[in-house]
Amino acid sequence: MKANFFNFSAFLITVTLLVFSSCKKQFDEPPIADLPNLESNATIADLIALAAPTPVELGTQIIEATVIADDKSGNFYKQLVIQDSTGGIRIDIDAFDINTDFPIGRQVWIKCEGLYVWQDGDVPALIGSSNTNDSRIPQSTYKQFVIGGAYDQPLTPTVKSLTSLSTADYHTLIQLDDVEFADCFAGSTYAFPSTQESKNAELTDCATGATLIVRNSGFASFSGEYMPTGNGSIVAVFNSFSGTPQLFIRDPSDVETMTGTRCTPLANYTTVSIAALRGQYSGNPTTATGKIQGVVISDAIGGQWQSQNLVIQEPNGSGITVRFTDDHRYAVNDYIEIKVGGGTLEEFNGLLQVNNIPACRAVNLNGSASITPRVATIADITANANDWESTLVNVQNASINGGTTYGDFGVMLNDNTGSIAMFSGFSNFASTPLPTGTGDVTAVIGNYNGTQLNIRNTYDVNFGGGSGGGGGSGNLNQISILDVRNLYGGSPVTAPDTTKIIGVVISDLVGGNWQPSNLVIQESNGSGIVIRFASNHNFNLGDEVEVDISNQTIEEYNGLLQVNGVPNNNASLLSSGNSISPRVATVDDINTNADDWESTLIQVMNADLSGGTTYGDFGILLNDATGSISMFSAFSNFAGTAIPTGTGDVTGVVGDFNGVQINIRNTNDVNISGGGGGGGGGSTVTQPIATIRGLFSGTNTSAPALTAIAGIVISDKD
């Protein structure tokens, strides 16, 4: 007879197994019983076949697909990308953390009734509205359309060659083998995390030499990580933007096999000092190795250097001239790193430079810095020319002779130890008169078959206690903007010494319809003019500013009169929240008075717009009963916004780009069919919160006048 007893050990083991089994299932995926019971009646290819430039409303179609890309890493913004056996498509959703419910590899059904399919440029998309300016499926409703199925159903990428990719592969997961990032990008960060700028990194196919862009968002969680330096395979979603094919990885694991031997070896990019780089040159052209860091001391705006050339100096150290293969974008005081490895170290008419450097090998490291110039006599400069070449110096108690303008050949800088050539023959300030008297001069030591000095702009010359050729300090005399405009007689002219103007800003930095270094100011009921600063400014619509224009160049740029190259610290804020009442005028009035009214605010009544569908289209015309005039906003922040139909009033700034045009500040300047604002700048302008955040650069700043934001409250007051 068997004994009856309770086996506690066996019971404990059984319970433990059940507990662990239950816990594992809970965290892996929802129970199978929770999966929906849906059947597809269409494919992604069926939807793509319906796509058109105007959104097409869908009906009872249901498609079954797999998520191949989500928003987890930030490289896909407010999107899911799904794929079935017939193709792939993106879904635009106005929500964050979509991946929490619909991660990569999850099976989904899309119930299409209430959605639209749209041909967005080159690629199709599923959207939630016929309004392409606000087309994402709302956060509150998207789960009615996107129904989740089983997890962990990843698709195997289709192996392709770079040259075999076609439009049929858009929004599908592909794999390219035997590829590597081009020399410029290998080993650099995926994007620019400090500025949140995106990066287009070039990928090379070793077999064919063909290239393709890998697009990396500056907001991606991996933007500050480094791209692989080796050869291997990449898995990515194939896409296109405005006809340019491109790839998007989901995260760096998509390139984790790129560790093999490269088909094109990388140049040597070990960090070296600029002095060590100069030491690699021994008299004959040689291939440079390494990468350098330093501060830009040449000035692209002043025109004293060719747009492909840049001079970089280490603080209290050596400098060198770098010649890129394309125009660069760096300004005075930018702190940058340049991969010079592979470039050619050689002399050009006596000046040592590292030549043939692709512009993509330079990157701004961390904002700006400054170089304190070495105080030296002309005898010092002459004696140390080879060692000091491409560095910044300051000569005290100097005088200038040998010409009447900066552009004259034969201009000499003199002190009590000697003389040295000072050349500005091809600069933007070449026609500016030379100052008389004595003072100090800051310049870069150059060489053109002999040592010479190159000033960056006229403010490097500080004679008589002022800069810019004998002015700029002490009491300034205010003149009217009309007086400034009248100084111009058809050719570049210099503004008088110790001169300032005051006006209210009528251009809009936030709207982006002007370059960030340009500003338009107008006197109340008076004239206006464009100020072009040496670098980006931070003045907002409605600010009253004072600008020291002493010895600055007044000239036309493609027909638009401007004061050019004004140092940013020459302008100061007097007050904010001001407004200029626009002049009410017809289109015919504007065309007739264009020269006098240029850079002033006008308002056209009973007007309509034609020539395009969005503000960014080329050929947009503003029309009234008296005529038509160009209205240009192609590079603004609101370029993608649809233009309104009907008639109404339009406020704008009279501009000129080889012909008269109107520049609106933002869409509230257009008050047509009851929409928009305008009417003299009294209405607020709603801006994206991201735009407002972008105004902050580390120190307190004021929000622009007449600016509003809108959003959903995510904090809880209770």
Image (cartoon, helix red, strand yellow):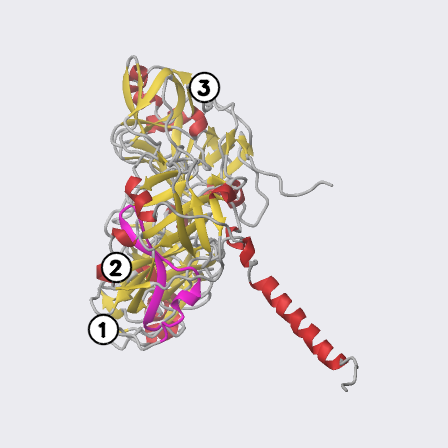
Label for residue 674? 3
Q: Residue at x 51, y 32 (%)?
A: 686
Q: Nearer the viewer, mark 3 or mark 1?
A: 3
**Which one is earlier in the sequence, the residue at label 3 or at label 2?**
2
Q: Nearer the viewer, residue 384 or 534?
A: 534
| Amino acid type of the residue that numbered disc 3 sits on in the rendered structure | Gly
Can residue 451 be seen in this snapshot? yes
Q: Position of residue 446 (x, y in %)?
A: 31, 61
Q: Nearer the viewer, mark 1 or mark 2?
A: 2
Relative to 85, 113 lies left or right: right
Q: Which quarter of the figure is the C terminus placed in?
A: top right
- Count residues near mark 1 (Cα–Cα under 10 Å), then give few for <14, some for 14-19, many for 20+: some
- Count residues near mark 3 (Cα–Cα under 10 Å), then give few for <14, some for 14-19, many for 20+: few
Distance from Cα at disc 3 to Cα at disc 1? 68 Å
Tell me the magenta residue range.
Answer: 230-259
**Which one is earlier in the sequence, the residue at label 1 or at label 2?**
1
Q: Nearer the viewer, mark 3 or mark 2?
A: 3
| Amino acid type of the residue that numbered disc 2 sits on in the rendered structure | Thr
Instruction: Identify the element where label 2 is drawn.
Output: loop
Task: Verify whether residue 256 appears in magenta.
Answer: yes
Looking at the image, which residue sits at the far top? 625
Q: Residue at x 76, y 85 (%)?
A: 2
Task: Verify whether residue 13 appears in magenta.
Answer: no
Q: Which residue is mark 2?
A: 325
Q: Position of residue 445 (x, y in %)?
A: 34, 61
Q: Residue at x 34, y 39 (%)?
A: 118
